[in-house]
Amino acid sequence: MSSPRTPGGSLRARVSGVVKFYNPHSSFGYIVQDDGSDDVYVHAKALGAVPGGVLQAGDKVEYRVAVFNERPRAKDVRVLKRA
């Protein structure tokens, strides 16, 4: 199994985006990155700092991007502003 880290071995710098959708029953969703990069997958495990552990579409968030199985994934997600 691949490590959720960049090839250099560390998580990328914190970036921001807006939650595209989040399904609390399935515990996952996607974030649209502010820089226009590909959408980022987010799982409930990355929401430790989020009150209630649930995101809402339209939430402004800050997070780190990690690469897992060659795909971007959000880690250490924090809500900056609720929708």
Image (cartoon, helix red, strand yellow):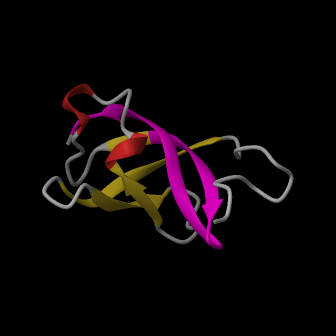
Image location of residue 77, percent across then percent down: 44, 38
Image location of residue 14, percent across then percent down: 62, 39
Q: Residue at x 31, y 61 (%)?
A: 29
The part of the chain drawn in magenta is: 62-82
User: Height in image: 1 above or below 56?
Assistant: below
Q: Quadrant of residue 30?
A: bottom left
Image location of residue 66, percent across then percent down: 63, 54
Image quarter hosting the N terminus: bottom right
Of all residues shown, which one is farthest toward the right?
A: 8
Q: Residue at x 24, y 26 (%)?
A: 51
Q: Residue at x 55, y 67 (%)?
A: 36
User: Height in image: 43 above or below 54?
Assistant: below
Left or right: residue 16 compared with residue 14: left
Give the total number of marks visible in the rendering.
0
Is residue 78 part of the magenta span, yes or no?
Answer: yes
Q: Residue at x 20, y 48 (%)?
A: 56
Left or right: residue 57 compared with residue 79: left
Image quarter hosting the C terminus: top left
Would you say the magenta stretch is mainly helix, strand or loop?
A: strand
Viewer-proximal residue, 58 or 70?
Answer: 70
Is residue 73 part of the magenta span, yes or no?
Answer: yes
Image location of residue 4, percent across then percent down: 63, 54
User: Height in image: 56 above or below 35?
Assistant: above
